[in-house]
Amino acid sequence: MNKNKFATTPPMGWNSYDYYDTTVNEEQIKANADFMAAHLKEYGWEYIVVDIQWYAHEAGSQRDKHQYIPFWKVEMDEYSRLLPCPERFPSSVNGQGFKPLADYIHSLGLKFGIHIMRGIPRIAAHNYMNIYGSDRRANEIADPSSICQWNPDMYGLDPEAEGAQEYYNSIFELYAQWGVDFIKCDDICRQDMPSSERETEMLHKAIQNSGRPMVLSLSPGPALINKAWHYEKYANMWRITDDFWDSWPLLVNMFERCELWQNHVSEGSYPDCDMLPLGYIGKGFGDERYTRFTKEEQITMMTLWCIFRSPLMLGAELTKLDQWTMDLLTNKKVLHLLSHSSGAKQLMRSKDQAIWYSKDNQDDRLYLALFNLSDEERSIKVASHEIGLECFSQYSFEELWSGERLSGSEQDFESKIAAHGAKLYSISMNK
């Protein structure tokens, strides 16, 4: 199975983490899926992803002390495979797992994804539990020194141990039976543990063995640029940053990260700028709020993510989206860049501004993105030769957020940009 056949464009969807943290339940997943199907699907949004600790009992109940309650009860089958907590996902009872929920998501014309942690549950190793498809036990394949720095649920696997690949095969066989389309694997991307690289290869092999196409997304970042070839070979998307939140300094930093990774965007393989903290977020963290990004900053974020061609994963509670945010997320001309442009390059970057451009794959149009990173309005100028044109006089400019149309002059194009704002132009030859 070629991993690129089912992620030919950057995945677009919704993930439960930014709003619900560890607490999301079946009813909430369905409500967000219903909204996506009714209002966002036609624009390319299609994945519904259940994030971390869907297997944990009483998740979020000790949030004042722990994000992840140490060594608490988890739902698991006899083969050391985690199952949805039936208290939060009632359709999972009697061994049905996520299949009923996945079937519901699929009935809406959407795709279903889940979050997993690298490795095997610690409690399975401590209790010498069985491994499906192997005569080895959980304790024989677990590496007790391979422990996530921020989540207490798992041990990493010993890639050399007999039965280790069989364990990954067994969980992906289960996910295939459920109808999972997308896997976000955590505690693996930045390779904190020596086995992370090998475990990525094992995950890829397990997906192939499952017989079901599943997008493989690796977290958290920052990914290692010297391992770009490895991410491209074995995953579909990989995080180039740690958790991204609604902070202007974090957004400014993404220009440096996108510059680093701009040559590694290809069909089926996408450096991932992380989730879009838009609308209402933070409820599961005890801090429900409307995004701290200004409208100009939100346009900057969407423009960079789209011209760079990052996957787009919404973090908002979809049912609370306001019309302005909906308009931001449903601009077909901007979203067109995800699926029909290529070769995005950063032409320049300073503390005050950045300039990107790319080309359309369907015609001769070019795209020009101007970013004002300063705290005051400023004019940004681009010379025609910088984007491979002799002059601008034969070209028209359409700003894709506002719809404003302009005619080009001779050699230079100049535009005023609001503080922390951006403009995205489509450049086409006059007919």
Image (cartoon, rainbow, N blue to C red):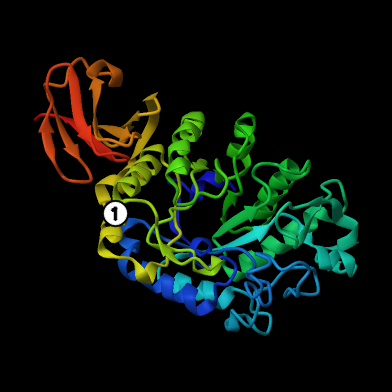
Please report the residue visible at 63 percent of the width from the left and 35 percent of the height from the top: 224
Q: Nearer the viewer, residue 103 or 187?
A: 187
Name above or below for residue 122 compared with residue 103. Answer: above
In the picture, measured across the screen, residue 384 lies left or right of residue 210, that is left
In the rendered image, the quadrant that contains the C terminus is top left
Q: Residues within 10 Å of mark 1 (few under 14, many from 20)?
A: some
Q: Nearer the viewer, residue 429 or 205?
A: 429
Q: Disc count in the image?
A: 1
Please report the residue visible at 65 percent of the width from the left and 84 percent of the height from the top: 93
Q: Report which quarter residue 98 is drawn in.
A: bottom right
Q: Is residue 135 visible?
A: no
In the picture, measured across the screen, residue 165 lies left or right of residue 175, that is right
Q: Report which quarter residue 394 is drawn in.
A: top left
- The location of residue 429, given as percent across then percent down, is 15, 28
In the picture, measured across the screen, residue 86 lies left or right of residue 375, that is right
- The location of residue 313, given as percent across then percent down, is 45, 55
- The location of residue 414, given as percent across then percent down, is 19, 26
Name above or below for residue 265 compared with residue 8. Answer: above
The amino acid type found where label 1 is placed reads: Leu
Please report the residue visible at 34 percent of the width from the left and 29 percent of the height from the top: 353
Name above or below for residue 277 compared with residue 69. Answer: above
- The location of residue 38, given as percent across then percent down, is 32, 70
Q: Is residue 20 visible?
A: yes
Please report the residue visible at 46 percent of the width from the left and 30 percent of the height from the top: 259
Q: Nearer the viewer, residue 294 or 197?
A: 294
In the picture, measured across the screen, residue 327 lies left or right of residue 28, that is left
Judging by the rendered image, the residue that carries numbered circle 1 is: 328
Name the secondary structure under disc 1. helix
